[in-house]
Amino acid sequence: MAQGRVGIAVELLETHQHAELNVHERFPMQSVYKLPIGMTVLHQVDLGLLTLDQMVRVETNDLVPPQVHSPIRDEHPEGAQMSVQALMRAMIVGSDGTASDVLLRLIGGPNPVQDYLRELRVTNVVVATTEKAMGQDDLVQYRNWATPEGMRTLLESLDAGRGLSTSSRSLLLQLLTETSTGAGRIKGLLPTGTVVAHKTGSSRTVAGLTRATNDAGLITLPNGQHLAVVVFVSDSTADDVMREEVIAKAARAAWDIWATTVGTTNRM
C-alpha cells in the first residue's frame, strides 16, 4: 500500500504497552525535526537565555527558497521583525521553514539541539542542517533523520515533562494541538474532537518519488491516557492520499486497541 518504507512506533505511555514496525530504521524527518528544535528553544527560554517576547530580525537571507513552505517569506519578502513566540507559532502550527531556520540560528545551530537531546537521553534523533539546505538539495533531508523509536522516546519525554518547565511544556503542547498541517494523517480516521498534539513532515515529490510523509504526536484517549504515535513513510511511489492513509490507519488501529480496552504488546 505504501509503495515504500514504513516505520511505526506506538506506545500507550501510561502502561508502556506498544506496537512497532521497523522502529530501528532511519527515516528523513523533514518538518518533524521542528519538534526537537522547538523544545530546545523553549529549554533556552527556561534557562533565561531567551525570552518569548524577545524580538528577532528576520533578514532577507533567512528566507527559505520557494520550494520550501514559508508564509513568512510570502508575506514579508523584505524580511520582518518577529518575537520568539511568534516564530515558534509559525514554525509549529504552520510548519514555516523560515521560522525554523531563524530559531535554529538563534539557539546556536544544530549542536545545542543535539546537546539537549542527549540531556533527555534521546538517541537516534538527529538535527543536522537547515530547511534552506533541504530546499536546495533533495538528498540533504536524509541528514535530518530519526528512527521511529527515537521519536517515540522524544514524545514520551514531552508527555512526562522532562527537560521543560510546566509553562514551556504547556505552550508547546498547545501549539502542537493547533497544528494546521496533516489533517488526513494521525487525525484522519480518529473520532471528531480527538485531541492530537502532533508535528508533520513532508517532502516534495520528485520524478514520482516522495522521500518523506510523516506525522508524530500525542493522542489523548477518552480515559485521559496518552498514545504516542510515530509513522514515517519514506521513499514512496504511492500518491498523496495513499501515503496519508497509511498514517491514518496506523493511528486508528492504535486507537481501536487502546481507547476502550487494555492492550497488550503487539508487533505491527
Image: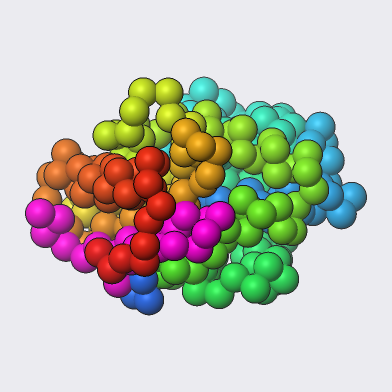
Residue 197 can be seen in this image: no
Relative to 26, say whether 96 is above or below: above
Q: Position of residue 207 (x, y in %)?
A: 13, 54
**Furthest residue to the right?**
48
Q: Where is residue 219 in the image (x, y as percent from the top left)?
A: 46, 41
Q: Position of residue 3 (x, y in %)?
A: 11, 59
Q: Position of residue 218 (x, y in %)?
A: 49, 45
Q: Is residue 186 magenta?
A: no
Query: Which residue sits at x=23%, y=45%?
Result: 249
In the rendered image, the quadrant that contains the N terminus is bottom left
Query: Which residue sits at x=78%, y=39%?
Result: 167
In the rendered image, the quadrant that contains the C terminus is bottom left
- Please indicate whether residue 246 sits to the left or right of residue 162 in the image: left
The span picked out in magenta is 1-22
Frontmost residue, 80 versus 13: 13
- Please indicate whether residue 157 sits to the left or right of residue 51 in the image: left
Residue 123 can be seen in this image: yes
- Please indicate whether residue 198 sits to the left or right of residue 238 in the image: right
- Mark count: 0
Frontmost residue, 210 versus 17: 17
Colour mapping used in the image: rainbow
The quadrant holding residue 19 is bottom left
The quadrant holding residue 89 is top right
Query: Which residue sits at x=37%, y=46%?
Result: 261
Q: Does the magenta stretch include residue 13?
A: yes
**Furthest residue to the front?**
261
Relative to 161, say whether 119 is above or below: below
Query: Which residue sits at x=47%, y=55%?
Result: 12
